Amino acid sequence: MLLTDKIKELDPKWVIEEITWANLPYRRPRKAGCNARLGVHGWGGDVPLARIRIGGVTGFGWCTWGKDQAQSLIGLPVTELFDEDGMLKERYYGMDFVLLDWLGQVFHLPVYRLVAKDLLPEGAPYTVPVYDTSIYFDELDIPDDAQAVECICREVEEGMSRGHKHFKVKVGRPGMWMPLQEGLKRDIDIILAIRERIGPDGKLMVDANNGYNMNLAKEFLKATASAKLYWLEEAFHEDDQLYSRLKQWMQENGIDTMIADGEGLASTAILDWVKRGLVNVLQYDLRGYGFFHWIKLGRELDRYGALSAPHNYGGFYGNYAQAHFAPSIDGFAFAEWDEAKAEGVDTSAYRIENGKIFVPEADGFGLVLEEDVFENAARQSGWRVGR
Ligand SMILES: [Mg+2]
């Protein structure tokens, strides 16, 4: 990766001068409903952002560090933070997104060019395949099945009008929210209808948020086989015994849907199950696990032919950051898009078309912070450390 060489060009006299932190509210275009285990997800939340100044240059990004932790960085030479491969040292994990954006500003390069495994061609627009992840249980109050299916299909059409072609759909209604048979039937009806609506080319995934058991998962997969699901996510709680039986049953029944898991408790054993082929797509959270940590993990998964799909619901900033992570490994599966707008962050350089994110050829993560909004939020409820 280019960053390995670029890091050596940093002026060793540059020290971390100032870090300012604030939460900026973000809002979805539509209220997100329940999933199999949680209630209404709502209109949005806050994006925790930090802005750093080093050598007079600023960058900003996702950051959940507290003030005291940030204070410990002030005065440190920036070269101290990285190892000789250009990777962030583990004790500074959490400042990944902030520092990567800053590096992009310093070298006048997008982050994706700095971290790409292989040099990316110039000239052609850089794109990343993306799916709309916003299809929740938004019809639980509709008793009529046909009307309920239509309600969800309209949401899919909204996504299509925003440039989406691929969708992940919440299932698992029989786990808690609906009676067993009615819930399973509705899950199945919705998936078959969405497949018809998006046509054969769009990839269709489902996420049960652990709301199925083995029998429900089998029933569901059997009834939706014609929809050719790309992956089944969190069918039930991570369990290698159940997964190996499910995999065997799927093989016997000619269902080649992949198994995706890992966003929940992120059991360390799951990595071993990925290596054994019981889980095909690993989904540790992008922000929580971190950008550099994910590069290390993704490189390891590449060796086993497994796919990397960092979890990215409810984060706003990750919609954009994940596109830059994608070329750092071979096995990036799919970007997860949770449509939202945040106050004070200009995302207009990005667009989604034909199921792809078109990533701008702009410095850092290609996002513009509206300084007055950020400063105001920092003064009201954030903090600042510096010399
Ligand atoms: Mg999920």
Image (tube, rainbow, N blue to C red):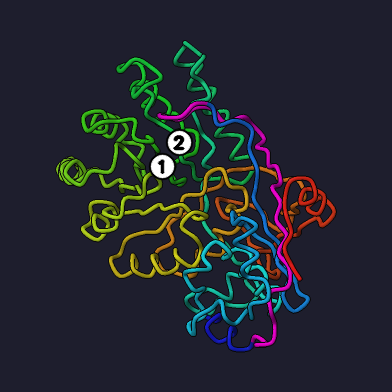
Which residue is label 2 attached to?
169
- Identify whether 332 is placed above or below 168: below
At a point 30% along the width and 17% down the height, the residue shown is: 181
Q: Amino acid at mark 2?
A: Val
Count of numbered labels shown in the rendering: 2
**Ligand 1 rendered quadrant:** top left
Furthest-right residue in view?
372
Residue 33 falls within the magenta-colored stretch: yes
Mark 2 neighbour class, 10 Å CA radius: few under 14, some 14 to 19, many 20 or more: many
At a point 57% along the width and 77% down the height, the residue shown is: 121
Furthest-top residue in view?
143
Which residue is label 1 attached to?
205
- Identify whether 250 is placed above or below 324: above
- Where residue 226 sits, quadrant-wise, is top left
Relative image position of residue 97 (x, y in whole percent): 60, 63
At a point 48% along the width and 82% down the height, the residue shown is: 85
In the shown orientation, is residue 29 left or right of residue 145?
right
Q: Which residues are magenta?
A: 10-39
Q: Earlier in the sequence, mark 1 or mark 2?
A: 2
**1 and 2 marks in contact (CB < 8 Å):** yes
Relative image position of residue 126 (x, y in whole percent): 60, 66
At a point 29% along the width and 39% down the height, the residue shown is: 237
Q: Amino acid at mark 1?
A: Met
In the shown orientation, is residue 31 left or right of residue 119?
right
Relative image position of residue 217 (x, y in whole percent): 27, 33
